Image (cartoon, rainbow, N blue to C red):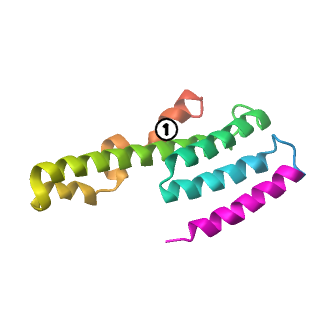
Amino acid sequence: MGDYSKALEFYEKSLKIREKALPSNHPSLATSYNNIGGVYNNMGDYSKALECHEKSLKISEKALPPNHPDLAYSYNNIGGVIRQQDFYDQYSSSYNDSHYRHGNNSNSYDFYGLTPVEIPQFQYPSHTLLQQNGFT
């Protein structure tokens, strides 16, 4: 596991330098917000991750033409956070319900060995976002 606090420290230093040196709609700022959002996502802080990815998207929408492929990064990252958050919420709820009903010997634990991509409802969550924005 990475040192998320150290990664955040350096990504935030990078963002501060870019904010001072670049105009507020520069694509490099969007990259910084995407990087910071990725760390928050890995830490499980989905609200902060989503906030960063949405800032990135707003900057990219101002700086780039509407069909620019770099916009897909933000859409993809937002979809990933939503997927992770939904999976975590479902996992926590299912685990608590199962544990309550069945105790420690439950066969329902088999579900938790699956990755999100093995569960049909979690496959390709950002595909819909890309379709809605004319990328596919």
Q: Which stretch is magenta?
A: 1-20
- Tell me what residue is drawn at x 57 percent, y 47 percent: 48
124 relative position to 32: left or right: left
In the rendered image, the residue lying farthest to the front is 100
Answer with left or right where residue 115 lies relative to residue 29: left
Answer with the quarter of the image where residue 10 lies. bottom right
Picture mark count: 1
Asked if residue 126 lies in the magenta stretch, the reply is: no
Residue 110 at x, y percent in the picture: 19, 58
Residue 111, placed above or below residue 70:
below
Q: Residues within 10 Å of mark 1 (few under 14, many from 20)?
A: some
Magenta stretch contains residue 14: yes
Residue 43: image location, x then y, percent: 50, 59
Q: Which residue is mark 1?
A: 127
Residue 9 position (above or below residue 40): below
Instruction: Indicate the secondary structure of the residue bearing disc 1.
Output: helix
Mark yes or no: residue 34 visible: yes
Can you say which quadrant of the picture contains the C terminus? top right
* Image location (x, y in percent) of residue 8: 64, 62
Residue type at mark 1 is His
96, 125: nearer the viewer: 96
In the rendered structure, the answer to whether residue 19 lies left or right of residue 40 reads right
Res 69 visible: no
Of residue 78 and residue 48, the one placed in the foreground of this image is 48
Q: Main secondary structure of the magenta part?
A: helix
Position of residue 73 measured from the top left corner of the image (x, y, whole percent): 62, 46
Q: Can you tell which quarter of the image residue 57 is in? A: top right
- Residue drawn where x is 54% and y is 28% of the image: 132
Q: Residue at x 53, y 31 (%)?
A: 131
